[in-house]
Image: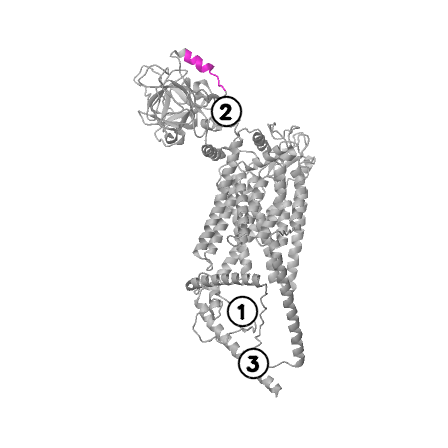
Amino acid sequence: MPTNNIVQRRKTTRSKSKQKQSAAESLIDNKNDSNEKSERLHFRSRSATLKELTAPVSVPVPATVNCNSTSPQCCNGLLPTTSQLVNCCHDINCHLNAPLSSLRNSLERSRRSESRQSFLTETTNSTPTPIPTLLSPSKPSFAPLPTSLESEACKKSRSRSSELDSVKQLRKDDLSSVAFSKFTVSLRIDLLSWTLFLVAFLTRFYKLATPSHVVFDELHYGKYIAHYMRNIFFFDQHPPLGKQMIAGLVGFTGSGGNYTFTRIGESYAANVPVFWLRFVPALSGSLLAPAVYKLLLAARLQRWAAALGGLLVVLDNALLTQSRFVLMESMLLLASTVGIACLLHFQRCSLGSLRWLSTGVTAALSLACAGCIKYVGFLALVLAGYLLSRHLWQLLYDASLSNRQLWLHALSRLLIFVGIPVVVYLGVFYIHLRTLHRAGPHDSIMTSAFQASLDGGLASITQGQPLVVVHGSQITLRHTHGRTCWLHSHAAVYPVRYKDQRGSSHQQQVTCYSFKDVNNWWIVKRPERDDLVVGDQPDVIRHGDVIQLVHGITSRALNSHDVAAPMTPQCQEVSCYIDYEIKMVGELLWRVEILNRQSEGDLWHAIKSEIRLIHTTTGAALRFSGRQLPDWGFNQHEVVGDREKGNPDTIWNVEEHRYTKTQDQRERERQLLSAEMIPTQATKLSFWAKLLELQTKMFWQATQLPSHMYSSQPHEWPLLDKGIAYWLDANSSAQIYLLGNILIWYTASAGLLVYAALLIFYAIRRRRLCFDIPDSEWQRFLSAGDAFFVGYLVHYLPYFFVDRTLFLHNYLPAFIFKLLLLCYVLEHLDFLLRRHCSGRALLLLLVYRLSLMIWLLAVCAFFVKFLPLSYGTRKMSAKEIINLRWKDTWDFILHKNHALN
């Protein structure tokens, strides 16, 4: 009889399971019908859903569910309870999420309060939470078990009770160790990372002080570092952080910076610490390999692909060469790589956590340092802005985030990645300007006010000179912005006719002269007065006053009239008036306009007042045209009268100034010719005024670099068409030549094309709802494109719009991102072969991996072959040099006395 009962119950169970399966199938049909009407984003296949619904344990169908109900379905296809309805998905476009946001928020708050209450209860009572059982003992689902099964159940029950006892003991141990957990530090060592660092360290520091000669741009950077150590002002078009770091280390070793460099190839003096000058770039180059490895891991590449990326950095000859000398690129690349790696970690952290704050601040600091080493480093900050914007755009799609949380995400990123770089940038230049307080060889580039703020510079002529310009003041007028030159005149006159047969006034020439000269002196005169002496009551010149400017040596007044200028015929000629006793009268009156009178006042001050001289008759402004006069003008620069008054070249300032003490012309000339410059203390100029002027000069001067025989164009960089000769030994053909590992560079360029082709292929296929790769791999594919492919374009494309001299080393930041993309492409191809190859087709996967190993061995061979051009330590014959010339565009250097064969 009991056996018949068991059989009967089993039949009943089978019939119920069939009913459940039929209910599940009808539910699937209803779900598929509704999914055809919903968005494609919520599409799920029928087979996957059938597997989920028919699973007896993981997804049981509740007995209370009515399969014919018309209640809304979750986007995962189930009929929701309250919990399922709220936790359906986080998609803000889901039709269930819009009306349930308040319900979700209330449930989240209740769950948090319950978790806090449960934690307090557990810590107070120290009683573990019982492990729930799957079957309730009060409501058995089956008949009593046989005796043997009962004994097994008893054994399981005893084992379960022993497990509970062990859980209680563990809970007590955990509670007792809570107080000491904050003092526990766990240390993890990544052997691959350290191995990459050690290998890179050995290659970068091998014979670092060799050659003991000036190599390429060490000529400039070495001078700047020496100026830093002696507090002498210098001008460079790049930010100063890299030079500050090297100067700080060299100064710490005890060197005084008393050395100079005159030419490339010159031997370093015995007191020059060559090793320490090259230490920071070499250390940065050594750290670049593990930094690339960590960046690839942060991008969720497999460890072998990340290690491959670090190894390729070690084996590239261009990165090796650039890391061994006093150059800035290795520090720039390290800062950019660390910044992007920390940024990828930052985007995966929860808002407000300690890891979120630390990785965000580190990323911002690193990216700011990259921009403060070279301005091209700010391209990495542009890439970071793109990644942050794209991540914020994805967060807008998340229905679990409230508007307040979204605003916190946006504002916190703005504060971290804009505020911190601005503070770092200002701090670096504050240190720069505070350190370089002594006058140096580059003072003439800056304005008179800037020079006057330096010890021993223009301050040598400003002490004791009057501050306010008055009637009878002897002044020199300097062109304030742009090229450094002073208003100048001499006895020579304009030719009667120019080469284009235009006539001139044949008056005395007025030019802008780039050197200090006695003919730069002018005397300020009131039109109604005949004397030039400054009396006991000086007649102060103010904004809007009309004056005459009399040339100090020739005593002729500044004049302009409606005659075309010699080199700029659309403007009018400026001259010093000569009375030829003809009907051409002099037009000698000029009105003084003080442009910065809001800060300097209405009085005309020497040094600081920026003025514009307006010709009262024609309304033209005195302007430096920038054109150079021919031989009859002694190749000086043209000065014209321009009726377009807004040009910055119409701005002038008084630099040197003294009062006229005698009326006798010969005595005035003698005083002008014998005047001496007496050293005095510096005048004051605010940090913000100096920073603004220095930034203006840096950006303007960047376009004035001369051409170079080893310069190249951006289209020549990806395939390594042209390198740079850095150094040549005076006694042999040993040389240092910037050239990358050609196999790496060509393979990386091919990787760009492969990624672009796959991106187009996947995009088209997914548009047709053909999903060739899993969604997780597709997201990883897009992430690699965002970080690496876009990073390459951001660092490469701007150079096509730059009108200045460029070199191969300008491509290295873009090359790093191309290298990173290559590592992902190689891993992705391995993934595709593993996914689609089976059976005999697995042979393709083995061939691919074998080819990858052979390619890596070839990379090592190429690296070793071109090492003599990276180190420059081995004397090479002309034949050996020629054998390394694999491309006709590689311009190696050979001595003339060496045969070419």
- Looking at the image, can residue 882 be seen? no
Q: Nearer the viewer, residue 697 or 879?
A: 697
Disc 1 marks which residue?
Answer: 48
Labelled disc at residue 14:
3
Name the residue located 52 percent from the left edge and 49 percent from the top edge. Answer: 790
Q: Nearer the viewer, residue 292 or 262?
A: 292
Q: Nearer the viewer, residue 151 or 513?
A: 151
Proximity of marks 1 and 2: CB atoms separated by less than 8 Å:
no
- Looking at the image, can residue 658 be seen? yes
- Decide which of tag 3 and tag 1 comes sooner along the chain: 3
Prevalent SS, magenta region: helix
Q: Secondary structure at mark 1?
A: helix
The residue range painted magenta reads: 667-678
Label 3 amino acid?
Arg
625 left or right of 773 in image? left
Label 2 amino acid?
Gly
Judged by depth in the image, the label closer to the viewer, 3 or 1, is 3
Disc 2 marks which residue?
Answer: 457
User: What is the quadrant of the C terminus in the image?
Assistant: top right
